[in-house]
Amino acid sequence: MSASARLVDLSHPIEAGMITYPGLPAPVVSEFLSRPASAERYSEGTTFSIGRVEMVANTGTYVDAPFHRFEQGVDVGALPLEKLADLEGIVIDAGAGRGVGPELFDEIDFGGRAILVRTGWSRHWRTPAYAGENPYLTRASAERLVAGGAALVGIDSLNIDDTRDGSRPAHTLLLSAGIPIVEHLTNLDRLPTTGFRFHCAPAPFRGLGSFPVRAYAVVGAATSTRT
């Protein structure tokens, strides 16, 4: 990273007992091996802690792979890094209202880029309002992003879809096109519209459709280092 670049964390911390999505259980954090217990295994003054975490995969800020929606889709472990890391990013301001329409993407070249939709909804994180009338992408917006060849789409909201629509059109259209989705982002107000690179690689778990990520942006690093 160049001296002029800065890092912006776009992830919510994961804590024991927190609720990400209504109806999904909170993570349980405990110790498999405590420091006092480990003292018996190592030299005097040398201790370790080995933690144990029990949680659903859709916890905190996470990425959805096609397998989340489609049985034969690519799982988290098979998502190519080219779809998750060192992506040129664009922030789209959603404005007022719930449904984010396709007109916001007019005259924007988002081919091969990470499109991050800034709704401001993350200000409600871990409050009752977060699970309320959250902003979402309309079907037409998802169609526009697929047609334009977006590499990844993220949003700082409860869900990229209208939770009252059981067909989940944004998930269906984006994931069927192999476009990963990142939900529950935060701090998008700290990013410029362009001029940053986006990263959100999860642990490469096989057989899972979603998994938490440490999403972040490198601002002032718009030129790719790929060859």
Image (tube, rainbow, N blue to C red):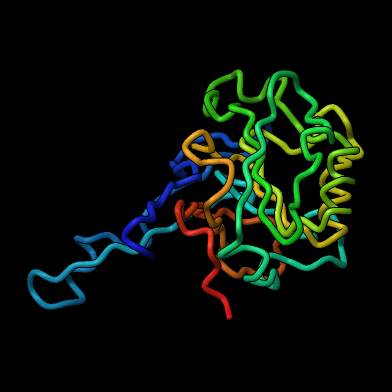
Q: Which residue is drawn at 36% across and 64% down?
A: 2
Residue plotted at (55% across, 44% down): 60
Of residues 155 and 128, the one drawn nearer to the viewer in this rendering: 155
Q: In this view, does 5 lie to the left or right of 86?
A: left
Image height of 137 relative to 197, above or below: above
- Residue 211 lies, with reference to residue 129, above or below; the image says below
Query: Looking at the figure, which quarter contains the N terminus?
Result: bottom left
The foreground one among 202 and 147 is 147
Total labels: the figure holds: 0
Q: Give the image quarter of residue 13.
A: top left
Q: Where is residue 132 in the image (x, y as percent from the top left)?
A: 69, 20
In the rendered structure, the answer to whether residue 119 lies left or right of residue 167 reads: left
Q: Where is residue 120 in the image (x, y as percent from the top left)?
A: 58, 27
x then y, percent, for residue 107: 79, 43
Give whichever of 224, 10 is nearer the camera.
Answer: 224
Residue 70 drawn above or below residue 106: below
Residue pictured at 56% horizontal, 58% vertical: 200
